[in-house]
């Protein structure tokens, strides 16, 4: 739908009127940049610079200008091969993120990337998401976080998508913004970024459409921003620690939708810096999600025609010794309760694991002791192992079903591969619908 990359004069004027002050004030100062070392370190030294899971890490490192030219060239060459060979099996959001990572900036000459081919394939995957929604009670193949990534990438890379359809499906009341009736800040933030891109492409005249669609999109952004701000915690986080980075990006690009007193960006930033100093964001994907905002960047800064910035002052840290993602496990054993809950049936077991073990270790041990009741399957994702199946029962997005992880009755805010269990914990995997 977008005809050209050149902005007409009207578009340029509108762009320059968009307030940018918020980002400038809020990004981490030059003097404080060393505070970001652990994050860059986690990202570069992990296996997450390999495989399709590397997309978000690459995007983040490139947006922040943390790689030197050799690293960038090497990682991009590897990544393009991965994308080409895995493309048919990628989910829409994985392909969208891959396109954003590859096109984050213009890298070394010599690597030519056929964007139009990838973007066309993304268009087809996005269509399949919409088709699934039409056939299955509004449920996409994946989720709205990924549909937002799709629209964002299609918008930034001149793909084909329907503006009226976007205005229709991204209504803030749509059930896909919610899990267990709880608004997903991550999802809302990604939708704001996508809708803002679409809005800018309309106002800059690249997309000729009905002004009613523009009004609707504008209204969706306003309401989503309100919902994001309603999830602000006392210390300034937006949602939880892992949604804060992308929510900051959403707020950066929509500062004319809220008042200065509704969000003190510095407070959010300082809380995040404090968390970093206490060892937060040990997961590469978690680090990748927070880093752009701390650099004053957003995914809307993705621009395949602007040259990459190389070798920031902290890039040399990639040679340092890696920090282990998994915590130290001690020799002493602890006992925990573990149960599998399906509707009203609960099967319980007490297992012993080494002190410092993660939830997955407990599941492994339970499976070893009683495979009939406690067998499970996990799948590697960008956040670590995702529990897809327990006792042969498989999660399914079309039915909005999944295996929920809980401890002492409370849903966990991290996964089986990273949650460290405590003696006496009452751990549970529960067959749930969201
Ligand atoms: C959609 C979503 C879900 C859906 C996934 C199914 C679906 N409909 O697609 C549902 C609601 C089922 C879900 C469940 C859970 N989720 Co969730 N989820 C997301 C969300 C919003 C988007 C994921 C996505 O599509 N990413 C984009 C694609 C391209 O990347 P991907 O790696 O291929 O995506 C897959 C994985 O992310 C996986 N997944 C989703 N959630 C989680 C959580 C963990 C720990 C793992 C390992 C994998 C995983 O599902 C995606 C589709 O297959 C993210 C937010 C975010 N910022 O990423 C939170 C997020 C990843 N989820 C989170 C959590 C905590 C969970 C649960 C552990 C909650 C619980 N107590 O049970 C469970 C997972 C339990 C399990 N079985 O292992 C946290 C993880 C934080 C962390 N530090 O580990 C996030 C970051 C939200 C947050 N801000 O707290 N989730
Ligand atoms: C550096 O960060 C701390 C909070 O961690 C903050 O108090 C201080 O003002 C920051 N310094 C600069 C120059 O921004
Ligand atoms: C990286 O992957 C290799 C091989 O798959 C594995 O042996 C190694 O332990 C992994 N390293 C980390 C830090 O996960
Ligand atoms: C890129 O892909 C498109 C669509 O598949 C194709 O028509 C075009 O020839 C390709 N361009 C190059 C340079 O390979
Ligand atoms: C773009 O998508 C619309 C419907 O979504 C379709 O009618 C049209 O043919 C598509 N155009 C191209 C060039 O693929
Ligand atoms: C487990 O380790 C923690 C610290 O790592 C310690 O405080 C606790 O006492 C240990 N528990 C047992 C039962 O060894
Ligand atoms: C999910 O369930 C639907 C039926 O509701 C089925 O058509 C589909 O194949 C299932 N998907 C997976 C991955 O099991
Ligand atoms: C999904 O739900 C449909 C209808 O509600 C049901 O027929 C089907 O068996 C379910 N599939 C799975 C995999 O749970
Ligand atoms: C397991 O749960 C039972 C029943 O709630 C409780 O009596 C027992 O103390 C628990 N054991 C452990 C190791 O947490």
Image: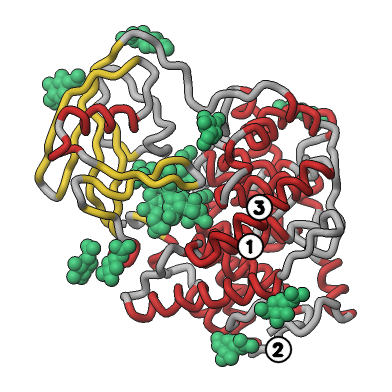
Residue 129 lies, in percent from the top left, at: 45, 73
Q: CA distance from mark 2 to mark 1?
A: 20 Å
* Nearer to the camera, 162 or 236: 162
Mark 2 lies on a secondary structure that is loop
Residue, disc 1: 193
Q: Is tag 3's residue or tag 2's residue first in the polypeptide sequence?
A: 3
Q: Is mark 1 within 8 Å of ligand 1?
A: no
Point out residue 308 in the picture as x, y percentages from the top left corner: 84, 52
Is the distance from the Cβ of mark 3 to the nearest ligand 1 atom less than 8 Å?
A: no
Q: Quadrant of the N terminus?
A: bottom right
Which quarter of the figure has residue 102?
Answer: bottom right
Q: Residue at x 59, y 41 (%)?
A: 48
Lower position in the chain sequence, tag 3 or tag 1: 3
Query: Which residue is tagged 2?
Result: 208
CA–CA distance between discs 3 and 2?
A: 35 Å
Which quarter of the figure has residue 355? top left
Q: Is residue 177 left or right of residue 337?
A: right
Residue drawn at the location 26% of the way across and 42% of the way down: 376
Q: How many marks?
A: 3
Check contact, mark 3 vs mark 1: CB within 8 A: no
- Looking at this view, is 166 or 320 the one in front? 320
User: Which residue is identified by label 3?
Assistant: 79
């Amino acid at each position: 739908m977008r005809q050209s990359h050149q902005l007409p004069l009207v578009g340029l004027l509108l762009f320059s009127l968009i307030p940018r002050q918020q980002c400038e004030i809020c990004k981490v100062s030059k003097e404080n940049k060393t505070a970001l070392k652990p994050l860059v370190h986690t990202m570069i030294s992990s296996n997450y610079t390999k495989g399709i899971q590397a997309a978000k890490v690459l995007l983040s490192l490139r947006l922040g200008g943390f790689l030197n030219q050799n690293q960038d060239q090497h990682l991009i060459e590897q990544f393009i091969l991965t994308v080409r060979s895995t493309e048919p099996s990628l989910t829409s959001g994985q392909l969208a993120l891959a396109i954003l990572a590859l096109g984050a900036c213009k890298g070394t000459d010599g690597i030519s990337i056929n964007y139009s081919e990838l973007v066309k394939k993304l268009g087809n995957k996005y269509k399949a998401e919409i088709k699934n929604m039409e056939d299955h009670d509004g449920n996409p193949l994946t989720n709205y976080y990924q549909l937002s990534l799709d629209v964002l990438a299609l918008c930034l890379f001149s793909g084909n998508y329907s503006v009226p359809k976007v205005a229709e499906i991204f209504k803030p009341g749509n059930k896909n913004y919610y899990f267990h009736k709880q608004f997903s800040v991550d999802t809302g933030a990604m939708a704001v970024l996508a809708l803002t891109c679409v809005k800018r492409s309309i106002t800059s005249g690249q997309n000729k459409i009905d002004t009613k669609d523009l009004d609707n999109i504008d209204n969706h952004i306003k309401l989503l921003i309100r919902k994001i701000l309603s999830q602000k915690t006392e210390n300034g986080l937006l949602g939880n620690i892992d949604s804060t980075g992308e929510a900051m990006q959403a707020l950066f690009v929509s500062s004319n939708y809220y008042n200065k007193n509704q969000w003190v960006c510095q407070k959010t930033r300082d809380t995040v810096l404090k968390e970093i100093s206490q060892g937060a964001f040990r997961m590469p994907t978690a680090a990748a999600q927070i880093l752009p905002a701390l650099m004053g960047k957003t995914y809307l800064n993705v621009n395949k025609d602007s040259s990459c910035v190389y070798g920031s002052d902290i890039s040399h840290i990639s040679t340092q010794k890696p920090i282990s993602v998994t915590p130290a496990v001690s020799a002493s054993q602890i006992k925990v309760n573990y149960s599998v809950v399906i509707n009203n049936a609960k099967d319980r077991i007490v297992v012993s694991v080494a002190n410092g073990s993660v939830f997955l270790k407990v599941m492994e041990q339970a499976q070893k002791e009683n495979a009939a009741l406690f067998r499970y399957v996990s799948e590697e994702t960008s956040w670590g192992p995702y529990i897809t199946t327990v006792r042969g029962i498989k999660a399914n997005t079309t039915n909005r079903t999944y295996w929920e992880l809980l401890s002492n009755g409370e849903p966990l805010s991290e996964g089986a591969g990273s949650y460290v269990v405590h003696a006496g914990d009452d751990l549970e995997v529960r067959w749930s619908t969201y």
